[in-house]
Amino acid sequence: MATVPSLAATVHQRVSDALSAALPEAASADPLLRRSDRADFQANGMLALAKQLKGNPRELAAKVTEALPAHDENAVIANIEVSGPGFLNISVADKAIMENLVARQRDERLGVPYKDDPGTTVIDYSQPNVAKEMHVGHLRSTVIGDAIVHLLEHRGEKVIRRHHIGDWGTNFGMLIQYLIEHPHELDHESDTAGAKDAGEAAMARLNRLYKSSRALFDSDEDFKSRARDRVPALQGGDPETLALWHKIVDESKTYFQGVYDQLDVEIRDPDIVGESAYNDDLQQVVKDLEESGVAVRSEGALCVFFEDVKGPDGTPTPLIVQKSNGGFGYAATDLAAIRNRIGELKADTLLYVVDARQSLHFRMVFETAQRAGWLPEGAARQLPFGTVLGKDGKPFKTREGETVRLVDLLDEAVERAAAVVREKADESVGEDEIQQRAQQVGIGAVKYADLSNSMTRDYVFDLDRMVSLQGDTSVYLQYAYARVNSIFRKAGELEPVPRPELELAPAERALALHLDAFGDTLVTAADEYEPHKVTAYLYELATLYSRFFENCPVLKADTREQTENRLFLCDLTAKVLHQGLALLGIRTPERL
Ligand code: ARG
């Protein structure tokens, strides 16, 4: 394993060194290096610096240029010139580019660095609710959370996953009471084969239970009060009540796993630590908050108040930790979870991948935990995401105004993908193969669309666009990957061999420099929790690859050396596409 600094990083360092040699008083100034079309890189930092020092930017830039050669060991910089009002245009040597790529290709991590100071992050994501269907909001949390887990782990961070499922609360009183009175409600004949079918069957039973118990609850006052009395029995740990509760939770987990299976994400049972897990800590949370004065009794409820959180009429809106009837809610559980994650799991960072509509809740919960001394300042962070919209621009619903079932949506994505795949595939490809590719294309498309939008923005769920071969889609990237493979199938005995002595054509340079930026991209995406930086990078990579492919014949290049060198670029492109997409949870079929 060897970390390979990018050429951008090396050039940045060289220019910084030259800058401080030329102007010791500006030793810590940032040269502001960017990729550029005119040269390989452009440094704009001299402008601001000259302004600050009341000097002439072109003269300053010239001084830096003079100081450079002395600092440029291994001849990375091939050319540097002052341009415009005082920019530096910098080109790097072809040989330096190729040598960097060779070092990447030799390393199984492609030269991407580990974090210097890895810590422990607890990430709260994919938290559906028991006895309910999963919807597009849960899709976002699952897909984004899964990508962030991979990105952080890839950086060497210790990541603990927590699926804070909604498995507790007053609703369960109704469901359990109904089961006590109708013991066969969840019975079924035999287990269905396959996670997906088993999951759907389980959800169907839960839906039936929910509907029947709800109907009785709404129409029969006696049942309603028996259902209410069931809640303290659950919270108090009555064995019969708990056993039935377990049955309901297990049915739901069967359903969740079916969806996860279809979505091709790995969710492990021990990481499913739902709201119920904190039940025993809630009394202590309340006691500590009340004794320390962080929370106060108001009209019987235990509340935490905030200067800046007020309702429309100006009265403060508190965070309610315990209701006046003694019941605990969502907030109490989240506070107990923070104590567990910081205190027991020893997390340095807490992340919450949750809908932006819950931002106020988290702000109040974090602030409360800080006041109580349970949470260091800045250690917790919500990664809020926007709403999934229908084509009408309104929150995604069925025509009847109901929440869209995630499974239906995924099925449809795979079906559309099958059409695209069938169209591309030649006759020799069998139906099984088509279905398998369609699965990887359809699910990839849904994930990619979700990740490629900046997280906080709402986005329109448009399957036609998602599975399109054109544009910023995973299919386009998967297609680029498949195309590289097809070159290798045709290459015969020709092998990828880097030839650093060759001069690079413009389309080769552009591709090569972009390949070299993979590590820098992963570092920023992980450190800033922004998977969409990876999608943007990969899209650009596929675009540059197709430009290279059009302009630079690979198997029919002028010389054998050139073919070998181009095959090397193809090979590295495939590796980067594969690793990048894998980190996002997206598969790369060998053929499309
Ligand atoms: N179950 C909740 C929902 O479906 C999300 C839970 C978010 N996580 C948390 N720690 N509160 O909206």
Image: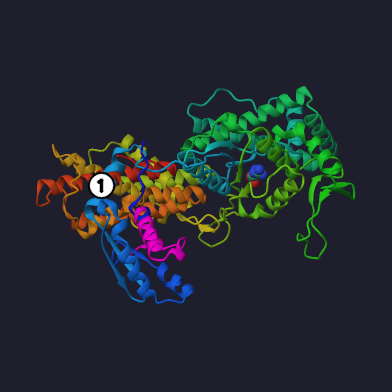
Residue 359 sits in quarter: bottom right
Counting from the top left corner in percent of width and height, residue 589 is at: 33, 40
Q: Image quadrant of ligand 1?
A: top right
Name the element at disc 1.
helix
Q: Which residues are magenta?
A: 10-36
Q: Quadrant of the C terminus?
A: top left
Q: Quadrant of the N terminus?
A: top left
Q: In the image, what residue occupies the spot 46% across and 75% down?
A: 51
- Give left or right: position of 83 versus 134: left
Viewer-closest of 9 and 499? 9
Q: Is residue 98 above or below residue 175?
A: below
Is any atom of residue 179 visible in this view? yes
Counting from the top left corner in percent of width and height, residue 201 is at: 56, 32
* Mark 1, residue position: 99
Viewer-closest of 520 and 442? 520
Give amino acid for label 1. Answer: Glu
Is residue 301 within the magenta segment?
A: no
Is any atom of residue 555 visible in this view? no
Viewer-closest of 271 and 68? 68
Is residue 24 within the magenta segment?
A: yes
Determine crowd level at label 1: few under 14, some 14-19, many 20+ residues with C-alpha closer than 10 A: some
Q: Is residue 237 above or below residue 174?
A: above
Q: Is residue 156 above or below residue 233?
A: below
